[in-house]
Amino acid sequence: MSAQCVQCGAELDVPPALCASCGAIQPFRPELSLFGVVGMAECYDLNPQLLRDQVLKLQKGLHPDRFANAEPASRRASLEWSTRLNEALAVLRDPLRRADYLLKRQGVDALGEQVKVADPELLMTQMIYRERLEDLVRAHDLTALDTLRQEVEAAATKAVDKLRMLLESLPCNQPDAAGSALRELQFLDKLLGEIDRSEESLQNA
Amino acid sequence: MALMQIAEPGMTADPHQRRLAIGIDLGTTHSLVATVQSAVPTILQDHEGHYLLPSVVRYLANGEVTVGYAAVAAAGQDPHNTIASVKRFMGRGHEEVQTLAGHLPYDLIPGEGMLRLRTRAGDKSPVEVSAEILRKLKALAVESLGGEPEGAVITVPAYFDEAQRQATKDAARLAGLNVLRLLAEPTAAAVAYGLDKKSEGLFAIYDLGGGTFDISILRLQAGVFEVLATAGDTALGGDDMDHVIAEWVMGEVGTAVEDPLWRRQVLQHARNAKEALTVQQTVELPLTLPDGSSRTLSLSRNQLETLIQPVIQRTLPACRRALRDAGLKIEALDGVVLVGGATRVPALRSFVGEFFQQTPLTDMDPDQVVALGAAIQADALVGNQREDLLLMDVLPLSLGLETMGGLVEKIIPRNTPIPVARAQEFTTFKDGQTAMAIHVLQGERDLVQDSRSLARFSLRGIPPMVAGAARIRVTFQVDADGLLTVTAEETSTGVRSEVVVKPSFGLGDDEIAKMLQDSFVHGAEDVASRRLYEARVEGERVREALQTALASDADLLDAEEQAKLNAASAHLNDCLSKNDADAISKAAEAVEAAAEPLVQRRMDNALRRAIAGRSIDDLGD
């Protein structure tokens, strides 16, 4: 089903935000997926650099700066498209959020509040990491903290590899395993944030 | 028929095809206005050749307002009514300002919301005071450009929160400016610098102004300026260096007198000393003490460096945070650009060089670069072709909501690229509840008491339901200026709730309306001077067109026609030397009427020559 330009009637490209024929900005389409809004194929293994280039290219034509002196309807549309593009970049370039988004698209909410984790191994790993972090902070050991960071980053990379395998074909046919890997990745991400904050407060002390 | 200047085909087109736009750097201590002329960003200068306008506003007894150097001169004698560094008060409450560096000589009125200053001209909001500075800059622009700018880009510190930004936008509105964009100062500097040097890569902009500090990390690539992270301190600047020097002076002299005039004098000496020590190794401060006696102090550059070291060190945490948030190590940076007058201080330059492990870039005037960048963006936004330029900025401070127990739940984290929107679902806790209050805060802390209250939003018109049944989707949208709008919808019924905003430190719509009305008093004077200005511009255009025409074609008129034209022209000259707009307009019309025969015959000749194949160049040799 192809859409038509509201101004000149020409057929719209993918993504359908600006008319290739007359340049008019189209009303925002909230139902478009994040992939649809950037005009890229829906898959897990995407190239973050390509994604970024595509988003910047689209922003050049849709950003509110292009419509600073335009009529309210165009300014409104520009704000909506530009906001959605930023959201697409933020979600799709992050392996964790991208996986979460794809699973949500097939109705699986792996990180929701309702999910109770019954994975004793993961819980144990989390506790050990947390204790190590506390010890290092107490000891003011910035070097060891950096080592811990590198370890956690390596573990996160492994989790992303696992997700890539599980999400190779969509929809994912092992949603439970994918959900598990996702929760592990989320924990590691949060831990990295805590390491950041600890480093910052130790440095500023 | 109007007296026209006849142009040959092929001559350059009217330069007025470009739309007029200006960039304004509304600084704590100095302000500037700039525009792009013939593709060159240019700072506009006043009649004395100054490009810096001191951000000082003085309210006189007769109701007049002076802005700039004249106000600075009077600051020593009239501290309560001469407001300097008003930027420090924008969007701020009375309580917060008490903890600012130094003692302020102003009469601050306690109360809720944004503070007010008591002056002889009434209680003034910082928004009104800033509007006076913007009015002056606008008038300078109108005069220099020969017309009203269609829009302006106003810069704000990157670390300015919502209340401070909104206050700036309100001030611009009061001053009669169409704000195209609020632009972050470091981003503006990056644009000016990046386009000038055609730089690409990762750059840190270290911006230490009179009263605010920003550190922004940007990626520059083929006309795209992407802010990766920003951090700062909106209560840290060159002013703070002046204050520590002033404290030292007071200590040396031994007076702790709470005399605003003495304080002002000492601050001025401190500032002069700081600036002098940028080029000298020692400086003398000749003081006149409150008791009338004289005393001269001597300050060396080494002593200065010791005194200001704590101020410089205060910039460190923000630098670290920005790098961390950008996910970069120091080595990854291709350059560090210094912005702001305070970065001229040698001690600061060596500090920056040491921390960033490279010599900072200082080849653009640190006072001008922000205004130039703003002018470039204004030029692009107003519609002059500039498709290659894209500025992607970020939200500097996390946005959060108050939840149970006085906690803040972050909904949009800091350094999120803007524009950005986030939706959150709420529900009712009482049967039949039709309204809801949402408290929005900014900051990185977890408790409400440690965060900056932005506004309270009341959602009204929620369809009455059983408690917990309503699904209220609240959307928080931050636009390209960094300003927040809130919309709410009950998703099961589709009913849009009305959102009433009560800003915590801002001006309500009715306050702005009243201020706008008050400004019409000035406005009437402004309108009169505009009419005079326009009449004069037109009168001079007619005079010039006539001179051009007479230079080549005076012989087309007979004696009587020439006499009539000379009389009309003499009368116009006379009117132009006076201040009656109507008289000038009438005189200009009279000249055009008297020149009718001349115009007609010039046209006929030109047509005849064109047909005969000869060009106008052949005449008058």
Image (cartoon, coloured by chain):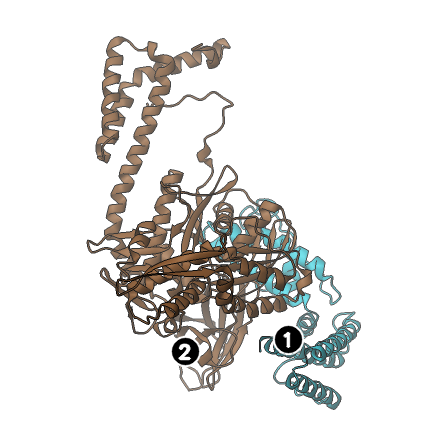
Query: In the figure, residue A164 lies in which quadrant?
Result: bottom right
Query: In the figure, residue B257 lies in which quadrant?
Result: bottom left
Mark number, residue B594: none
Q: Chain of mark 1?
A: A
| Local secondary structure at mark 2 | strand
Query: Does residue B17 appear in the picture of this structure?
Result: yes
Chain letter corresponding to the colour brown: B
Query: Does residue A33 appear in the picture of this structure?
Result: no
Q: Amino acid at mark 2?
A: Ala
Tell me where residue A91 appears, x and y as whole percent: 64, 67
Tell me where residue B233 appears, x and y as whole percent: 49, 67
Q: Which residue is mark 1?
A: A196
Q: Is residue A64 left or right of residue A100?
A: left
Tell me where residue A121 appears, x and y as whole percent: 75, 89
Q: Which residue is mark 2?
A: B437
What residue do we see at 59% from left, 78% from top?
A: A201
> In the image, which is nearer the foreground, mark 1 or mark 2?
1
Q: Residues within 10 Å of mark 2 (few under 14, many from 20)?
A: few
Q: CA distance from mark 1 to mark 2?
A: 34 Å
Chain letter corresponding to the colour cyan: A
Q: Are marks 1 and 2 on the same chain?
A: no
Q: How many numbered marks does the figure carry?
A: 2
Can you name the residue that lies furthest to the right here? Answer: A165
Q: Chain of mark 2?
A: B
Q: Is residue B173 above or below residue A142?
A: above
Tell me where residue B423 appears, x and y as whole percent: 53, 72
